[in-house]
Amino acid sequence: MDFLLQIGWLGLPLLVTSIWAVEIIIERFFLLRKLWVRKETAVLDIDFLQRWEQSDQKEQLSLRFGARKDWLAQIVSHFFMESPQHPRSAELLAADLHFLLTARLGSLSTIARIAPLLGLLGTVVGLVNIFLDFSQATQQLDARTLLAGGIYQALLTTVAGLLIAIPVVAAHRFFSHAADEMEHMMNKVLTILSERYSREKGV
C-alpha cells in the first residue's frame, strides 16, 4: 500500500491492470490444464488412431478416450461417438477449442503494452512536478532534496509498469506457444480422421 501511495494517482490504473492480468493468467492456466495433452501422450494417441481399423467396435476408443476431457479426447469422441462420422464436425469442434484457448491472449498482449506506458507516463508526470518544485525552491539544499526525492518517486512508476509487463509477456508467450502446439497436433488428428472417412466412404 505504501508503494502505491508513493506512486500517486497512477498507482490505481497500474493496480487495476495487474489484477486484470493475474485474473487472466489464472483463468488461462486452469483452462489449459483441462484441455492440455502431453506431447508424448498425443503422439501415442495419434499412432493408435492410425493403426485402429475397427470403426464398428468402439469399446477401445471408449476405454482410451471416454474418461478424458482434453482436446484430443473431445475431438475423437465427437467424431466417432457423438455425431455422424464426418470430418467437418470434428474440424468445427477443433476450431472452437482453439478459439477458446486463444480467446484472451489479446488482452494479455494489451496489458503487456499498456503497463510500461503507464509507468513511463508516471515518470514523465513526476519529472514535470520535480522541475516545477525545483524552480520554486528558495535554497540550494532544498532544491537538491526535492530533486533526489522526486526522481525516486517518479521512477517508481516505471518500475511498477515493468514489474507488471515482464511476467505478462512471459505468460503470453507461454500460452501462445501452447496454443500453437495444440493447433499443430489438432491438424494431425483432423488429417487422420479425414483420411479414415474418405477411406471408409470410398471418396
Image (spheres, rainbow, N blue to C red):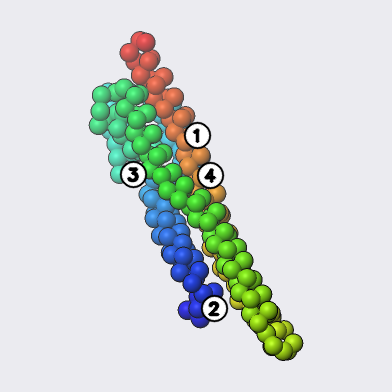
Dot 2, crowdedness within 10 Å: few (<14), some or many (≥20)? some
Q: CA distance from mark 4 to mark 3?
A: 23 Å
Dot in front, 1 or 2: 2
Tag 4 or tag 2, which sits nearer the N-term?
2
> Which residue was labeled with disc 1?
184
Where does label 4 land, which residue? 177
- Residue at the location (25% across, 24% down)? 84
Q: Residue at x 51, y 39 (%)?
A: 180
Q: Amino acid at mark 2?
A: Gln
Which amino acid type is marked by label 1?
His
Q: In the image, which disc is placed on residue 6? A: 2
- The residue mark sitting in front, 2 or 4, is 2
| Residue 125 image label | none
Q: Is residue 33 visible?
A: no
Reading the image, the residue beneath label 3 is: 68
**Closer to us: 96 or 48:** 96
* Residue sitting nearer the eye, 40 or 57: 40
**Mark 2 → mark 4, Cα distance in angstroms:** 37 Å
